[in-house]
Image: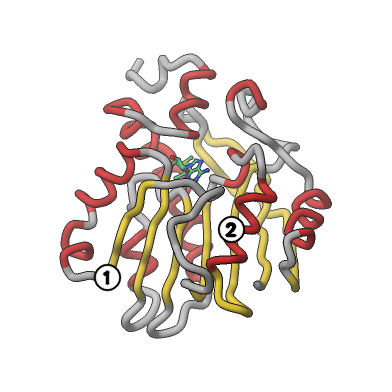
């Protein structure tokens, strides 16, 4: 059994929410392998135009960064993550894009973003919103840093098929579609759409499983 297969569920959960050290790197690489096909679809669905300024919250190891930048000419990418391990790894894996000024990775949280108002055309996150204990703070920050009319898109766990460890004591806060819709509207988002999507995934033990996730879209 490998190191990450032998992790206790609570440790696996903690590494998902704030990856640390060699184990955190391995856990997030596994997440990337498991989610990459649906993440590529999510990025394509952003419909990015040439010159767009895009923010990804919770970029993990930053493997999706080249995919984002490849969507159109002159896209500028910023990433924000609470894990110093992930910031260092994303900068390492995307060193050429960082050196060319096309990508920047910031240490910080969705709830307190280090960006001025109206900085981005699009903000997205994959597998992150279920870690927010105060989602109204994160959503109002997303709306603040988006230009008027800008797009927010997020994918997160659905309570119906979330793993058993995804509980508040392990840093997971699951919400249903109506609650996510209400939260978006309460901070002023418009055109809010919360969709249920079925995706195949590989679980911590390497087994193929079917999961539902939410895909949420809204405009500032
Ligand atoms: C499960 S990983 C998902 C990584 C990547 N998006 C993917 O799908 O492969 C969650 C990431 O979100 C980050 N994260 C968790 N809470 C966050 C917050 N409040 N603000 C910013 N990043 C956060 C974690 O550090 C981690 O890198």
Marks counted in the figure total: 2
- Is 93 in front, or is 99? 99
In which image quadrant can residue 55 be found?
Answer: bottom left
Image quarter of the N terminus: top left
Horizontal and vertical percent for residue 122? 52, 71
- Is 71 in front, or is 118? 118
Image quarter of the C terminus: bottom right
In which image quadrant can residue 216 be found?
Answer: bottom right
Spatial CA distance of label 1 from label 2 is 23 Å
In which image quadrant can residue 115 be found?
Answer: bottom left
Element on which disc 1 rests? loop
Horizontal and vertical percent for residue 21? 29, 28
Disc 2 target residue: 141
Give the side of residue 102 with respect to residue 34, left or right: left
In the rendered structure, find residue 102 and report the number of the disc placed on it.
1
Above or below for 204 versus 50: above
Q: Residue at x 27, y 70 (%)?
A: 102
Horizontal and vertical percent for residue 108? 42, 47
Q: Residue at x 58, y 61 (%)?
A: 142
Horizontal and vertical percent for residue 97? 22, 65
Element on which disc 2 rests? helix
In the rendered image, is residue 45 in sight?
Answer: no
Q: Residue at x 26, y 44 (%)?
A: 89
Q: Nearer the viewer, mark 1 or mark 2?
A: 2
- CB of mark 2 near ligand 1 (< 8 Å): no
10 Å crowding of disc 1: few (<14), some (14-19), many (20+): some
Give the side of residue 140 with respect to residue 76, left or right: right
In the rendered structure, find residue 179 and report the number of the disc placed on it.
none
Above or below for 36 versus 50: above
């Amino acid at each position: 059994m490998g190191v990450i297969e032998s992790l206790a569920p609570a440790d696996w959960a903690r590494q998902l929410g704030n990856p640390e050290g060699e184990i955190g790197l391995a856990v997030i690489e596994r997440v990337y392998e498991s989610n990459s096909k649906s993440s590529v679809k999510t990025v394509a669905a952003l419909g990015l135009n040439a010159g767009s300024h895009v923010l990804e919250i919770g970029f993990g190891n930053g493997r999706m960064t080249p995919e984002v930048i490849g969507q159109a000419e002159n896209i500028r990418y910023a990433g924000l993550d609470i894990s110093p391990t992930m910031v260092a790894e994303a900068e390492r894996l995307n060193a050429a894009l960082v050196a060319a000024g096309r990508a920047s990775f910031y240490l910080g949280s969705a709830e307190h973003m280090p960006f001025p108002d109206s900085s981005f055309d699009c903000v997205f996150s994959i597998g992150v919103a279920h870690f927010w204990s105060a989602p109204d703070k994160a959503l109002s920050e997303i709306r603040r840093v988006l230009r008027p009319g800008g797009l927010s898109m997020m994918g997160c766990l659905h309570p119906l098929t979330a793993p058993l460890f995804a509980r508040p004591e392990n840093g997971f806060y699951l919400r249903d579609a109506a609650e996510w819709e209400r939260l978006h509207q309460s901070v002023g988002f418009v055109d809010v759409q919360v969709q249920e999507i079925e995706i195949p995934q590989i679980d911590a033990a390497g087994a193929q499983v079917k999961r539902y996730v939410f895909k949420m879209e809204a405009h500032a």
